[in-house]
Amino acid sequence: MSHREPTAPPLLSAPARKIAFIKRGRYSGTNSFVRRELERQFPGHELCEIDVGVDLLKRHPHILALNWLHVFLCYGWAILRKRRPLGMCFYYTPYIARAIRRLLLAHLAPRAQDFAFSFATQSLYNAKIPGLPHFIYTDHTHLANLRAPSFDRAFLATSEWIALERQVYHDADRIFVMGENTSSSLIEQYGEDPARVRCIYGGQNTDSVKPPLDNNDYCNQTVLFIGVEWERKGGPELVTAFTQLAARLPKARLRIVGTSPKISHPQIEVLGLVPVERIPALIAQACVLCLPSRYEPFGIVVLEAFAQKVPAVVTRVDALAHLVKEGVTGRVVEPGDTAALAAALEDLLLHPEKCRAYGEAAHSFAAEHFTWESVGLKIRYEVDAFLEQDKAVDQ
């Protein structure tokens, strides 16, 4: 995964113009960092942020209401059988994808000449404005989920929605992705030209100032889980694995952050949702982060742990298989193998010197490859190069 850092070309000499930055919500904190880097790397441009939820959909409550009807038309059977959470359906109907497209066109197309380019995060909606260079930055494709052995096909979107997603990629001038797994999915599953896909990685979404480690030099036997989607992130498997090792390690404890499953165990602490500012302190108190996801587009929390010299135990799925190097920055086990997961965690908890060595290697790896500054520089390099090429073609 080594790469050569590009040297930034001179800023374009065109007069100051605007950038249309299209996003949805926080995107695990990524959107605020992407915005910061766009402002930093393109100082001669005014950033105009459009949140498709707050700025567009909430102004049209009839669209929101109608979409819930479409959610049940598309996924009602899976929802009723409790195989697909309701909250994971809203942005996966063809109706909402087309509605967002219409709203964005109405909002931006009449003033397209004011913008130098548009930049969208995620690939749940098509933000391409005719005649305006358009770039996407995403951590996933929907079809990449099919590569995860434990992926439940009840989570698969309709073929009509997937066709619209395919169009999102086709209409973009460059597709920036966080991981190599997403690059390969775009090329192999969506038929995208490799020349249009750029793997620029991602950064950590917590403050750059980290508290000192507070884990008794990796001896306090604390395992940390951070994730909102309990089942997709492998929470049930982690509880099963931890229960097995807890019987042998009475001082071990598991801390669960981001969600509140109903668990009663003397060595398991459920903290639920916490302010993002508290995350670095919680990581500093852990010996190891565990993210045994069933499928995982990227896993930024792993980078946040690495930044604080905390190793990770993950499953061999999607981006996690690229982020964590077995026996170097942590441990990698097969998804669903709770016995292997318990053994990997126990090995690290019993050997603090191994945790320390993995943590040091993880910190070096993250510092070299995964910073928002590095991401921003790559974005500027690629956008400037495309705009220069596009300008030359027009001339």
Image (cartoon, helix red, strand yellow):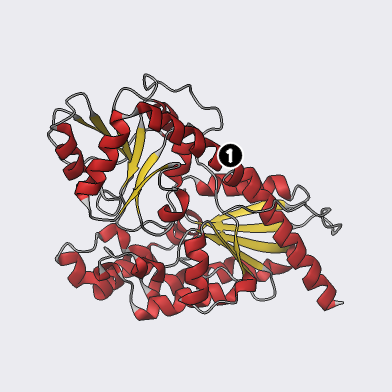
Residue 108 visible in the snapshot: yes
| Quarter of the picture holding the C terminus | bottom right
Residue 222 in sight in this render: no
Of 178 and 350, the residue lying toward us: 350
The image position of residue 77, as x and y in percent, is 18, 72
Looking at the rendering, which quadrant does residue 73 occupy? bottom left
Occupied quadrant, residue 301: top left
79 left or right, relative to 28: left
- At 57% from the left and 61% from the top, the residue drawn is 120
Is 83 situated left or right of 13 in this image? left
Q: Secondary structure at mark 1?
A: helix
Residue 147 horizontal/vertical position (percent): 36, 68
Q: Quadrant of residue 135?
A: bottom right
Most foreground residue, 328 or 4: 328
Which residue bears the numbered disc 1? Answer: 367
Left or right of 317? Residue 42 is right
Residue at figure coordinates x 23%, y 55% from the top left: 336
Residue 57 place in picture, x, y as percent: 44, 61
Residue 145, image x and y in percent?
A: 36, 66
In the image, residue 169 above or below residue 307: below
Which residue lies at the image location 37% right of the left edge and 25% below the top edge? 218
Quadrant where the N terminus lies? bottom right
Residue 285 is left or right of residue 378, and the answer is: left
**Count of numbered labels shown in the rendering:** 1
Q: Residues within 10 Å of mark 1 (few under 14, many from 20)?
A: some
Front residue of 360 and 200: 360
- Under mark 1, the amino acid is Ala
In this view, 234 is above or below 389: above
- As displayed, is residue 20 above or below residue 342? below
